[in-house]
Image: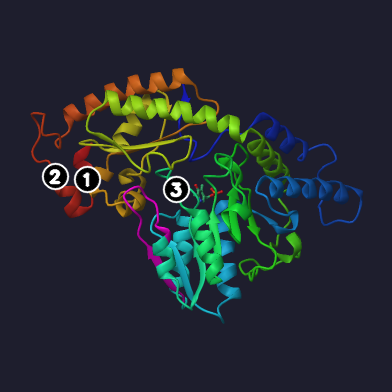
Amino acid sequence: MKRIYLDHSATTPVRSEVAEIMYKYLTEDNFGNPTSLHWFGRKVRKGIDEAREKVAKSIGANAKEIIFTSGGTEADNMAIHGVAMANKNKGNHIITTAVEHHAVLNTVKALGKQGFTVTILPVDKYGAVRAEDVSAAITDKTILITIMHANNEVGTIMPIEEIGVIARSKGVLFHTDAVQSFGKIPVDVNKLGVDLLTISGHKIHGPKGIGALYVRRGTKWKQSLFHGGGQEGLKRAGTENVPGILALGLASELAAANLEKDNNYLKVLRDKLIKDVLEKIDQVELTGHPVQRLPNHASFTFRFIEGESMLLSLDMKGIAASSGSACTSGSLEPSHVLLAMGISHEIAHGSLRITLGIGNNNQDIEYFIKELSVIVDRLRAMSPLDPDNEFSQSSDCVSCKESGSCNNLA
Ligand SMILES: *Cc1c(COP(=O)(O)O)cnc(C)c1O
């Protein structure tokens, strides 16, 4: 069957050059422990040093400011926890937004149970935080602002530069999760005005299980999660993931080198996709910002149908997408991001996210639109929610609201 992958915000295929360098650092004589003083160790150490330079260069940082981690989640945890622990004598207040990735939200919530006070800022209907709300939330106890660069669910780009200026002027440390933006739009730690920044390998055509945290030189931050050896300049204990680090170095270099070309290519495809969906299907809305959004990102809500049903139907046609409605994934609540944007439960249940990659082309979009139109028509014809069809009972998902279950929607 034809297989079309349209879920690049979830993960990306590994570039062949990147897979090759991983293989190289798993084989030949590249198996040494980088801490070892002998030739085998030194050889691998040199590879890590070069990868660190590449990652640093791709975000406008210095190699000494890069710490390799096991991924975006660890880097987010390390950033937030590390600032909290190093600054708890100064204050206990942390500011974030309602639409962060769970790696950030659950970390600040955990700190909220350990004596820290957390302000979770609201967002506008596009999913963007207002810089003035950030400014107004700062108190003399504020030690950290952590706000994502671009949202994974709706693609909205946050006003990070503006917030960076505010954070700097008030002397508050500023962390951004740039996992989704890195490799898609320019990410420069100085332009953004951030003190800490997170990236992840598998969102930029690298492998899973590797990421990096940037910590600006002089930042009051301390390694506080792992206890162990002195790797990563005492900042991240544990023998280095050598193939992963080499892969992240190359993936970052390639992402930065191809940024403009890929960005232009993806934008054209994305705009065609958005235009076609809005034109060819009715009762559908774009979620997230119409302009300030990732070049590869399209997300929608469809009335009277459930996101999970759309996903499964698309999957039967070989199309991989994702949804913010999580009825079948164990959680009964629809996406916290869509709800924070003021979208109702009922409408949020009909969400669909399409995220493109450099491997996609026009034919993929055409096939997707063709199949989606058929699927939407079929699901709506069966939907008890659609007032136009004969089975319709109510335009409200009553049982969904009352019991949190949406079994009657399928
Ligand atoms: C994927 C993602 C993460 C988590 O990164 P992992 O490397 O998968 O742990 C964090 N933040 C955002 C915005 C993401 O999209």
Question: Considering the image in quadrants, where does the N terminus appear?
Answer: top left
Question: Considering the image in quadrants, where does the C terminus appear?
Answer: top left
Q: Taken as a whole, is the magenta stretch helix, strand or loop?
A: loop
Q: Which mark is residue 346?
A: 1
Of all residues, the one furthest to the right in this rendering is: 39
Q: Residues within 10 Å of mark 1 (few under 14, many from 20)?
A: many
Q: Nearer the viewer, mark 1 or mark 3?
A: 3
Q: Is residue 95 above or below residue 405?
A: below
**In the picture provided, is 58 more to the left or to the right than 399?**
right
Q: What residue is disc 2 on?
A: 396
What segment is highlighted magenta in the picture? Answer: 116-131
Q: Earlier in the sequence, mark 1 or mark 3?
A: 3
Query: For numbered disc 2, what is the local secondary structure?
Result: loop
Q: Is residue 406 above or below residue 138?
A: above
The front one of 97 and 5 is 97
Q: Dividing the picture into quarters, in which one does residue 244 lie?
A: top right
Proximity of marks 2 and 1: CB atoms separated by less than 8 Å: yes
Q: Which mark is residue 151?
A: 3
Whether label 3 lies within 8 Å of ligand 1 gets the answer yes
Q: Earlier in the sequence, mark 2 or mark 1?
A: 1
Query: For numbered disc 3, what is the local secondary structure?
Result: loop
